[in-house]
Image (cartoon, helix red, strand yellow):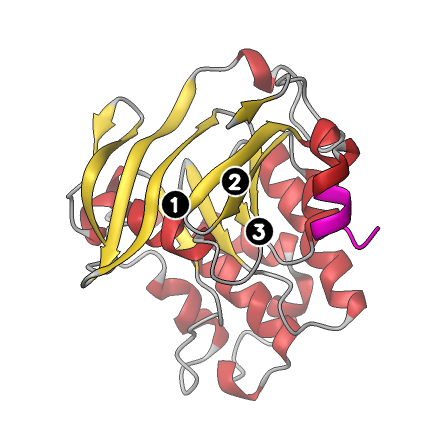
Amino acid sequence: MSEASATAGPGAAAGAAASAVLLSVEGIHSYYGAIHALKGVTLEVRQGEIVTLIGANGAGKSSTLRSINGLPTPKVREGRIVFDGQEITHRPGHEIVKLGISQSPEGRRLFPRMTVVENLEMGAFQRSDKSGLKEDLERVFSLFPRLAERKTQKAGTMSGGEQQMCAIGRALMARPKLVLLDEPSMGLAPIFVERIFETIVEINRQGTAVLLVEQNALMALDVASRGYVLEIGQVVLAGAAQDLRRDEKVRKAYLGE
C-alpha cells in the first residue's frame, strides 16, 4: 500500500491533518462464514475529517463499515478497531452507537410505515437527554428543510432523495462523533446528489467526522480530506484526496478518465 501526503483536500475541515486519531482500523480480517471479505484492512479517521473509501463493487467498502459498527456479519477474526481510545473490535452494535458511531446504511433502511419524525426519533432511542432531542431534531430540519415539510408523512411514500435525507438525519439523531455513510447518492437524481454532498460537508463543518463509502468517486474525493482505495478486500492506495484525484490508476479506474 502506498501512502501519499495527508494534506487536507478542498472539503476538509481546517487543521484536520494535525488532529487526533478518532478511529483506527488495524489490519482487520473479516469473514462471512468461510468467505474472507477483508484481508488486513488498515485505515484511520482523525477528528474533523471526511475520509472516503472508493473501489469497485465487491471491493469490501460496505464490509469495512459493517465491521466497524458491530453488526454480527462479517465477523472480525484478526486485527483490531479502536474508537476514541477504546477498543471496539467485538463490541455489539448498540454499545458502539452509545460510544459515538452511527451509520446511514446502504439502501436507507427506513421504517416505511412510520412518519419522518418517528424515523428520526428511532435514531435517538438510546439517548436519555430528552432536552437535547428537540435541539437535534431542529438541527436535522435545518440541514434538510424538506424533511420539516414532510415530518408527518410516512417515510415509505417519499422520494428516494427524501428518504436518503431521512436516513442521514436518523444517524445524526444519535449525536455521533463519527457518522458512517454508505452509498448516500445511490439511485438519486443529480439535484439530490448535489444537495446530499453539500450537507455532508456541512455536517462535517459542524464538528462530526465522516467515513464515506460512495460510488461517485469524483464527488467523494471533492469533499474528502483523505481517501483509501480498496480492491478485493485490501487497501491498495491511500493518501490525500487531491493526490488520489491526480493518480493515474485512480483516474482510469474510478473517475472515468
Disc 2 crowd, CA 10 A, few/some/many (<14, 14-19, 20+): many
Disc 3 crowd, CA 10 A, few/some/many (<14, 14-19, 20+): many
Measure the alpha-carbon separation of dots 2 and 1: 22 Å
> What element does badge 2 sit on?
strand
* Residue at which label 2 appears: 210
> What element does badge 3 sit on?
loop
* Residue at which label 3 appears: 55
Q: Where residue 158 sits in the image (x, y, percent)? A: 60, 83
Q: Is residue 25 magenta?
A: no
Measure the alpha-carbon separation of dots 1 and 3: 38 Å
Name the residue type under label 2.
Val
Q: Where residue 228 sits in the image (x, y, percent)? A: 55, 37
| Label whose residue precedes the other's in the sequence (1 or 3) | 3
Image: magenta residue range = 250-257
> Which residue is more in the foreground, 12 or 156?
12
Answer left or right for 245 relative to 137: right
Name the residue type under label 1.
Gly
Instruction: Judge depth for marks 1 and 3 and give the one in front.
Output: 3
Disc 1 crowd, CA 10 A, few/some/many (<14, 14-19, 20+): few
Measure the alpha-carbon separation of dots 3 and 2: 17 Å
Q: Where residue 61 sits in the image (x, y, percent)? A: 46, 52
Q: Is residue 255 magenta?
A: yes
> Which residue is more in the foreground, 243 or 221?
243
The quadrant where residue 49 appears: top right
